[in-house]
Image: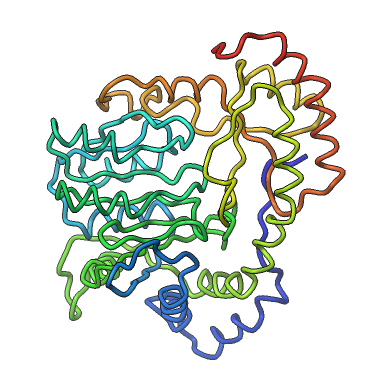
């Protein structure tokens, strides 16, 4: 049983958009499909803010989710060598993007339940350190509280860039807190490769666009920048996916109740909060086991069920980021590192798949869980 199966449009479905590319003969450099995609998303963003924000939304495209993070940081014009607070439990791209922008990474623990950096902890850190940026992560697609991060930024003056790589369709965009998204093939709204930056700051959006195109302004390079533009072909897939968005979400939504009930029946197993109410669905389905995850993963592998240890080991334990400082202890991150396990979750799961998973858990996993003391790491 595969862990992830991308749900992208077939060749026939793409033909109307590909023919438009043929007719326009513009393949990159902010072509008509890219401009249409940006305008469509800005006008019809899937998630409205909880509170009125008083400004229009602006969306800019990028060649990848990582490029979107780097563009947003560059457009924010952060001081070189400034400190960026981020969770220790995240994908390497979060930290790598900051380091590549000449910034310093500061890791912190995530909160229990949400598995996200909390505004409360960020406020505490901001009282003792001069932060250039805070970059919370919408872990596994769980939406961040945009209003709370807006309030943090308003009160502290520290800008917030939400790394919402896996949360397109779940994540609202605040007034001050901008967001970056990944459109990688494995994401719920995947196009193969691509990224988005969403902000209510029109000037920031324009800087992002310029920086994605070598820093050109008026035909001259006004900033040192690279090429991070989305091509017309990627935009064609994105527009086709946008037309399919209802079906994409419904496929996953239809499978969620039975899957959720299956997981609820596992003794001592925890799940990430934030998906039991409202419309948000997880991008990745990760359990918190009361026992070490490695033997559970091995047992499921013997049954032909693919699993993954996402974000393990945490970034401070990885060679590329070992020199980055950590603020405080990391108890939740450490627990996740030892006991979190990702299960298959995508729109092509069948009832037979769920039955196989249920039997495998009952045969190889549940007895182990019941024998081990809760909290064993």
Work out whether 97 lies above or below 224: above
Picture coordinates of residue 347 (x, y %)? 71, 54
- The residue closer to the viewer here, 266 or 135, is 266
Picture coordinates of residue 264 (x, y %)? 70, 34
The residue depicted at 12 percent of the width and 37 percent of the height is 130
Q: Quadrant of the N terminus?
A: top right
Judge from the rendering whether residue 44 lies leftward or rightward of residue 125; answer left or right.
Answer: right
Q: Quadrant of the C terminus?
A: top right
Q: Quadrant of residue 173?
A: bottom left
The residue depicted at 46 percent of the width and 70 percent of the height is 45
Work out whether 240 lies above or below 317: below
Judge from the rendering whether residue 376 lies leftward or rightward of residue 313; answer left or right.
Answer: right
Picture coordinates of residue 133 (x, y %)? 22, 45
- The residue closer to the viewer here, 197 or 54, is 54
Picture coordinates of residue 226 (x, y %)? 29, 60
Q: Quadrant of residue 238?
A: bottom right
Q: Quadrant of residue 267?
A: top right
Judge from the rendering whether residue 156 lies leftward or rightward of residue 176; answer left or right.
Answer: left
- The residue closer to the viewer here, 44 or 296, is 44
The residue depicted at 49 percent of the width and 89 percent of the height is 24
């Amino acid at each position: 049983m595969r862990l992830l199966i991308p749900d992208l449009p077939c060749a026939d479905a793409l033909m109307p958009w590909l023919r438009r590319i043929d007719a326009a003969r513009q393949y990159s450099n902010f072509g008509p499909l890219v401009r249409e995609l940006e305008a469509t998303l800005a006008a019809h963003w899937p998630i409205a803010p909880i509170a009125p924000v008083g400004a229009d939304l602006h969306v800019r495209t990028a060649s990848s989710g990582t490029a979107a993070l780097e563009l947003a940081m560059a457009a924010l014009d952060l001081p070189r060598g400034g400190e960026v607070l981020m969770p220790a439990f995240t994908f390497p791209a979060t930290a790598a993007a900051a380091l590549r922008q000449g910034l310093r990474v500061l890791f912190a623990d995530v909160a229990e339940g949400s598995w996200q950096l909390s505004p409360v902890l960020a406020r505490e850190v901001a009282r003792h350190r001069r932060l250039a940026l805070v970059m919370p992560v919408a872990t596994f697609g769980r939406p961040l509280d945009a209003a709370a991060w807006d309030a943090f930024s308003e009160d502290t003056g520290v800008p917030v860039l939400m790394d919402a790589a896996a949360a397109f369709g779940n994540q609202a965009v605040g007034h001050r807190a901008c967001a970056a998204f990944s459109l990688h093939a494995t994401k719920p709204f995947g196009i193969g490769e691509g990224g988005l930056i969403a902000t209510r700051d029109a000037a920031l959006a324009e800087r992002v666009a310029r920086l994605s195109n070598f820093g050109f302004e008026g035909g001259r390079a006004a900033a040192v920048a690279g090429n991070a533009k989305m091509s017309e072909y990627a935009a064609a897939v994105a527009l086709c996916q946008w037309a399919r968005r209802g079906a994409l979400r419904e496929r996953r939504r239809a499978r969620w109740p039975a899957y959720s009930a299956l997981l609820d029946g596992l003794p001592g197993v925890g799940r990430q909060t934030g998906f039991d109410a409202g419309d948000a669905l997880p991008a990745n389905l990760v359990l918190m086991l009361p026992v070490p995850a490695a033997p559970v993963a091995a047992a499921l592998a013997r049954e032909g069920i693919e699993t993954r240890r996402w974000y393990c080991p945490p970034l401070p334990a990885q060679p590329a980021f070992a020199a980055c400082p950590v603020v405080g202890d990391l108890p939740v991150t450490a627990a996740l590192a030892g006991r979190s396990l990702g299960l298959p979750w995508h729109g092509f799961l069948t009832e037979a798949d769920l039955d196989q998973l249920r039997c495998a858990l009952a045969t190889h996993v549940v007895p182990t869980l019941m024998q081990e003391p809760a909290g064993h790491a």
